[in-house]
Image (cartoon, rainbow, N blue to C red):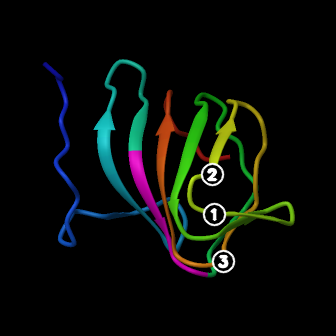
Amino acid sequence: MFPTITLPVDADAAWQSGPYDGVQLLVLHRDELSGGVTVLRKFNAGVTVPAHIHPLANEQVYVLSGEWEESGTVYTQGTFFFAPKGVKHGPHHARTEVISLTLFDGPLTRS
């Protein structure tokens, strides 16, 4: 029924280096038509991702575990973020290891 199925992630899963030091990605799905991607992201404790823009993709994030700080507020498990394409967001600081489920609905560029 579903065209894409990703089985439960295990400890040996193929995490890849992310666009910033201390960030790893596990790709769950790629949309070849839109360039979008759904990933699990793992931020090492203490990592700060600088403020940035995704000019061609909306970003939707659900925090699965950890403590994430942005603009003086700490967010924890169960927090949902939405960053519209073209809108600057961050910096993000991982106070602990953070794992999030993240969907980008268009191609990623770094700016």
Residue drawn at (39%, 47%), measured in percent from left and top? 39
Question: Residue 1 placed where, x, y %?
Answer: 13, 18
Give the number of the disc on residue 95.
Answer: 3
Q: Which residue position is annotated with label 2?
A: 79
Q: Main secondary structure of the magenta part?
A: strand
Q: CA distance from mark 2 to mark 3?
A: 15 Å
- Given contact means CB atoms under 8 Å apart, are the residues at marks 2 and 3 in contact? no
Amino acid type at image mark 2: Thr
Residue stretch in magenta:
39-45
Q: Nearer the viewer, residue 22 or 12?
A: 12
Q: Which secondary structure lies at badge 2? A: loop
Question: Residue 78 placed where, x, y %?
Answer: 57, 53
Quadrant in which residue 56 is drawn: top right
Question: Residue 102 placed where, x, y %?
Answer: 49, 45
> In front of the other: label 1 or label 3?
1
Residue drawn at (61%, 31%), measured in percent from left and top? 58
Side of 23 relative to 55 (left or right): left
Amino acid type at image mark 3: Arg
Q: Nearer the viewer, residue 1 or 89?
A: 1
Give the number of the disc on residue 76.
Answer: 1
Packing grade of label 1 (10 A; few <14, some 14-19, many >=20) is some
Quadrant in which residue 60 is drawn: top right
**Residue 13 lies in magenta, yes or no?**
no
- Given contact means CB atoms under 8 Å apart, are the residues at marks 1 and 2 in contact? yes
Side of 59 relative to 14 (left or right): right
